[in-house]
Image (spheres, helix red, strand yellow):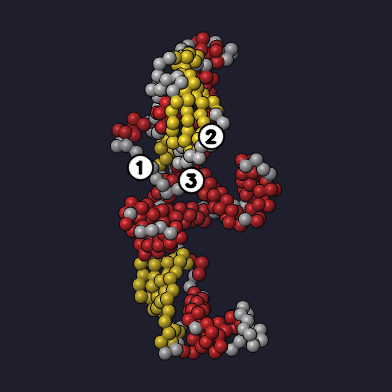
């Protein structure tokens, strides 16, 4: 076997490997033995089909087997565990086999130093004050008085509506009554079609997901929401234990700080991991990205993808993300001795089981039957462990929104994770 490296570009290599006549004959014998364990032909005893018959019957397929076996022999000299993908072509010249290999090895990733990274979070007091304001507004909404009004519905009003779904063939569903608040924003098309209508008006709307269905919405009543004033009387209305509005706000402040600690415990590791992955450097060849993109498009059966520049740009970014995220996480875990032991896995399974209202034993039985699901859960658990470890190493800075604006604004949100 003679091998020659023709090209190298980061993690991509192109090789030419030549097997002489004697080596090809040995490969033919290996293929013959292999096929005799799997094929049977009339007139031949099992395992006794001659090489010449197999070559004549299989033709090009027999040569393809030889090329595959030749690739396996070449790979014995290299690290098979480091192969991301490969492309193999071959040709025979006067009994000599020439393999043309395009090898895409797993690319290297350079990790940043966690202590050099910064995670910015809003000031604790700012978050708690926002929580108090929202909580007070929600409480006001719960205690609101609904007063019937004759005029058109406006944002902020409450409407009582009757909805009936009608199919094109004439069938109708049973009418159902709802009471909703008309909220502005959030692309709320439903509310937008009701605003300006009056009691007894009937609105016909298209269904969001089924074009064969039309919604018949009848406006039964419009109510003006009269919100109570934020004063001591309101505090007593919420709970007799509160004498003043200040008492209510202090109670909400305590709850806010408790929720804030839970929020930080969940939020900071996630953002730390996003920052870490964003700053990691993936040393990958454009040819590898092209190869993985091509396979992805074939699998998706995307027609004329190269005519859509935005689609291609997003698809290439997704390929890089597909490579970068697990490589970054796995390398950090390896370098920092982060492993999933039995105790950690047991605790994780119990937590998942509780979330899905089942038992850990049932979940384990399911995982035993579905190895792919188990692999996904182990990857997610490792991701969680790495994120928690990073959260204890990155710098945490509290920065107000107006301060970020003065600094030139926030960077665009990363999609690395």
Q: Is residue 371 left or right of residue 80?
A: right
Tell me the SS state at disc 1: loop
- In which quadrant of the rendered view does residue 238 lie? top right
In front: mark 1 or mark 3?
1
Which quarter of the image is occupied by the N terminus? Answer: bottom left
Residue position for label 2: 172
Residue at image mark 3? 390
Classify mark 3: helix, strand or loop: helix
Residue situated furthest right in the rendering: 361
* Residue 146 can be seen, yes or no: yes
396 to 113, vertically: above or below: above
Disc 2 element? loop
Please state the horizontal and vertical placement of residue 312, each as a whole percent of the image: 35, 55
Residue 415, x across and y down, in percent: 41, 47
User: Which callout, 2 or 1, points at the residue further toward the start of the chain?
Assistant: 2
**Is any part of residue 132 visible from this angle?**
no
């Amino acid at each position: 076997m003679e091998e020659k490296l023709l090209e190298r570009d980061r993690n991509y290599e192109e090789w030419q490997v030549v097997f002489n006549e004697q080596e090809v004959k040995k490969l033919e014998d290996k293929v013959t033995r292999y096929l005799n364990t799997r094929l049977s032909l009339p007139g031949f005893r099992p395992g006794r089909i001659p090489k010449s018959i197999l070559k004549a019957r299989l033709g090009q397929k027999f040569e393809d087997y030889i090329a595959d076996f030749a690739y396996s022999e070449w790979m014995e000299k290299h690290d098979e565990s480091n192969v991301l993908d490969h492309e193999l072509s071959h040709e025979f010249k006067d009994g000599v086999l020439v393999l043309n290999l395009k090898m895409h090895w797993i690319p290297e990733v350079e990790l940043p130093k966690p202590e050099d990274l910064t995670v910015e979070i809003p000031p604790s007091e700012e978050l708690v004050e926002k929580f108090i304001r929202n909580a007070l507004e929600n409480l006001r909404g719960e205690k609101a008085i609904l007063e019937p009004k004759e005029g058109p519905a406006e944002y902020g009003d409450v409407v009582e509506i009757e909805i009936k779904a009608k199919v094109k063939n004439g069938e109708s569903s049973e009418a159902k009554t709802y009471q909703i608040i008309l909220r502005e924003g959030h692309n709320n098309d439903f509310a937008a079609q009701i605003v300006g209508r009056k009691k007894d008006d009937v609105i016909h709307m298209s269904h969001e997901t089924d074009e064969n269905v039309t919604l018949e919405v009848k406006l039964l009543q419009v109510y003006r929401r009269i919100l109570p004033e934020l004063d001591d009387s309101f505090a007593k209305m919420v709970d007799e234990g509160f004498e003043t509005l200040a008492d209510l706000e202090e109670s909400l402040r305590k709850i806010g700080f408790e929720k804030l600690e839970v929020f930080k415990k969940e939020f900071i590791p996630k953002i730390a991991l996003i920052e870490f992955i964003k700053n990691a450097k993936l040393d990958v060849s454009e040819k590898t990205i092209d190869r993985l993109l091509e396979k992805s498009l074939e699998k998706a059966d995307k027609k004329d993808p190269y005519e859509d520049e935005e689609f291609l740009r997003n698809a290439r970014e997704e390929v890089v993300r597909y490579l970068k995220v697990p490589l970054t996480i796995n390398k950090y875990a390896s370098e920092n001795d982060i492993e999933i032991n039995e105790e950690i896995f047991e605790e994780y399974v119990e937590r998942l089981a509780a979330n899905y209202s089942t038992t850990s034993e049932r979940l384990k039985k399911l995982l035993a039957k579905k190895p792919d699901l188990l692999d996904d859960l182990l990857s997610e658990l490792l991701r969680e462990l790495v994120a928690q470890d990073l959260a204890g190493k990155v710098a945490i800075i509290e920065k107000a929104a107006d301060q970020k604006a003065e600094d030139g604004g926030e960077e665009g949100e990363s999609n690395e994770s």
